[in-house]
Amino acid sequence: MSETTKNRQKRIDSINDVSPSFCLAKWLQVTIDLVHGTNHSCHHPKRHVIPLKELEQNPSALHNTNFKKEKRKEMLDGKRPSECEYCWQIEDSEGDENSDRLIKSLDHWAYPHKEKVANLPWDSDIAPTYVEVMFDKGCNLACGYCIADVSSRIEQEIKKFGPYKELIDHRLQRNEKVSDDETKNPYVVAFWKWFPEIIENLNTFRITGGEPLMSVNTFKVLDYLKENKAENLTLAVNTNLCVTDSVIDKFIKNLKEVLDKKHIKKFELFTSVDAYKEQAEHIREGLNYQQLLSNIEKFKNELGVDVIINCTFGIYSIPKFDLFLDDIYKLKQKYSRIILDISYLNHPRYLRANLITEEFHETLRNSLEFMGSRVADFGGNSFSQYEVEKFRRVYHWIVTRVSSSEQAQNRADLYTFMTQFDKRYKKDFLTAFPEYKKLMLQCEKSYYFIKKLTVGEDYV
């Protein structure tokens, strides 16, 4: 075992020594949805409401809600909060890959604070070191696994076509918007009071959406940073990179001024794509695959910033994933510091990658071998062991056996969703995914058995 591996295992052991369910993200990371007044720590658990009453008494309740403090207590007591099932599934599956509980806790924004966090009373307020915020849900895409809460285009879709039939709550808005005007939203107002208090000690501030480049507050952040130093801060923005050229150019111009003044430590660009070309465009309605790749090159050429490509690995990712990996590999060969971050899709369940039949396991192995045969040091011009490890744990999760009843239900729901999704957006799933012709026949059979014969025509 190498010294690096020994040191990593020593840090993992020290985290588990606090408790076998201890996760530093619950204390130090927060994603705040200012549109609906909700938050969660780590993107896997569902968001919970930030009570305005708590916020009026304590601005840090944007992060330190009473609900979250109870979950922290569970972790300190060695209990597994049910909202963190993503990590418990990884820890209970085959393979010895680490869950996000450990990956996040080992991160540079988390691990140095381990002793402080472990010794705090469970109900203490704490300033986060990693903040992700959604100012507005305006978005130009309507991704298949997304919901109206974070996409104005899906909200428009539901208003036009109504709810999906035979799928409970699919894509529907789960929380009421606090205000249609983001400048008058009390959560946004509270944020701008809190932001100057926490920015000095922030390690990472990440803006998400919706599409952040469509929000006035994203540019307000840049204006703030033009005038105020945050020398230890990494600023990050999630963008689908499919907005107009003029918006991309405006953003690059403003960001360049902040970087030239050295008012922040660095900038990271996060974007998302989950499959290859037409398959990516099918599941992410409105995506232009080539435009996204071209804009990655534009950011690298003009600013030289780090680019992290998030891949939410679902059933749509599998058939041509080796070709997608080849496109990413070519970008890596041309530019350094392009990182592919693969996580499995958990919700909705009927788009999970483990719906596939065993015949596709070889396709998965081939993609994994493609990555594994092109490995370099982290941040180099190839895939890192970290990237390969994250895909390998997704692979092990996919091939772990699922109960036949659960599989049949999910396949029935896949057929239900995809036929309606295609109709709404004038698409054809099997044209984009001819590899799934046999699988979709099975999904159709499951649909008719579960939803028509067993439940009946009035199934909801």
Image (spheres, helix red, strand yellow):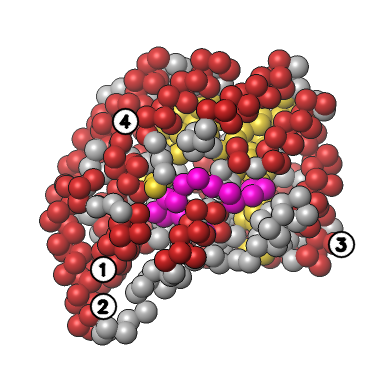
**Labelled pair 1, 3 in contact (Cβ < 8 Å):** no
Sequence-first disc among 4 and 2: 4
Would residue 271 be seen by someone viewing this image from the given angle? Answer: no
Instruction: Name the kind of residue labelled 4 in the image.
Output: Leu
Amino acid beneath label 3 = Gln
Q: Residue 200: image x %, image y %?
A: 80, 33
Residue, x 51% and y 36% (percent of image)?
243
> Mark 3 or mark 2: which comes first in sequence?
3
The amino acid at mark 2 is: Lys
Region rendered in magenta: 134-148
Q: Which residue is mark 4?
A: 325
Q: CA distance from mark 1 to mark 2?
A: 8 Å
| Cα–Cα span, label 3 and label 4 | 49 Å
Dividing the image into 4 quarters, which one contains the C terminus? bottom left
Using the image, tell me which numbered label, if any, was put on residue 451. Answer: 2
Dot 2 lies on which element? helix
Q: Residue at x 26, y 68 (%)?
A: 412
List x then y, in percent, for residue 167: 37, 71
Most distant residue in the front direction: 160
| Residue drawn 46% across the image and 55% down it | 146
Where is residue 294? Give x, y as percent.
43, 24
The dot on residue 304 is: none
Of the residues tagged 3 and 2, which is closer to the observer? 2
Quarter location, residue 403: bottom left
Seen at 81% across and 67% down, the residue is 53
- Residue at mark 1 to residue at mark 4: CA–CA distance: 30 Å
Report the disc number at residue 57.
Answer: 3
Q: Nearer the viewer, residue 13 or 403?
A: 403
273 and 69: which one is in front? 273
Disc 1 marks a residue whose amino acid type is Ala
Q: Are marks 1 and 2 in contact (CB under 8 Å)?
A: yes
Q: Main secondary structure of the magenta part?
A: loop
